[in-house]
Image (spheres, rainbow, N blue to C red):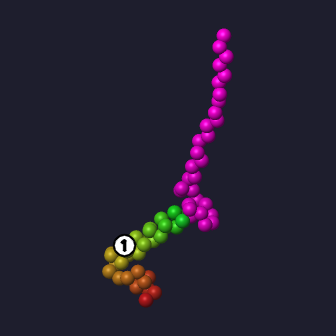
Amino acid sequence: MTNTTATTTKVTAPVIEDRNAWRWGFTPQAEIWNGRLAMIGFLAAVLIELFSGQGFLHFWGIL
């Protein structure tokens, strides 16, 4: 008769943070959203200048 003892090891999955989650404060997720929104704003300003033939501030009547 053979005596076999099975050993079990607990395997845990790594915790992966959702990089697209909306979090408040100075977090990496907030900086990612800040960068995305800044890129959209910059693109909007460039498109306004291209299609209107005026600078962004002139287009809005600030200058």
| Residue at far top of view | 1
On the picture, is 25 further left or further right than 50? right
Could you tell me which residue is drawn at 42 percent across and 72 percent down?
42
- Dot 1 amino acid type: Leu
Image quarter where the C terminus lies is bottom left
Q: Is residue 17 magenta?
A: yes
- Residue 56, position in %: x, y? 41, 80
Could you tell me which residue is drawn at 65 percent across and 24 percent down?
6
Residue closest to the eye, 58 or 7:
7
Q: Is residue 8 magenta?
A: yes
Eyeballing the image, is 1 above or below 21? above
How many discs appear?
1
The part of the image, by quadrant, that contains residue 45 is: bottom left
- Residue 13, position in %: x, y? 59, 42
Residue closest to the eye, 18 or 16:
16
Q: Which residues are magenta?
A: 1-30
- Residue 7, position in %: x, y? 65, 28
On the picture, is 43 further left or further right than 21? left
Of helix, strand and loop, which one carries label 1? Answer: helix
Residue closest to the eye, 1 or 57:
1
Image quarter where the N terminus lies is top right
| Residue at far bottom of view | 63
From the image, give the main secondary structure of the stretch colored magenta: loop
Eyeballing the image, is 47 above or below 5? below
Could you tell me which residue is drawn at 48 percent across and 65 percent down?
36
Local packing at callout 1 (Cα closer than 10 Å; few below 14, some 14-19, many 20+) is few
Could you tell me which residue is drawn at 49 percent across and 67 percent down?
35
Which residue corresponds to mark 1?
47
Residue closest to the eye, 50 or 1:
1
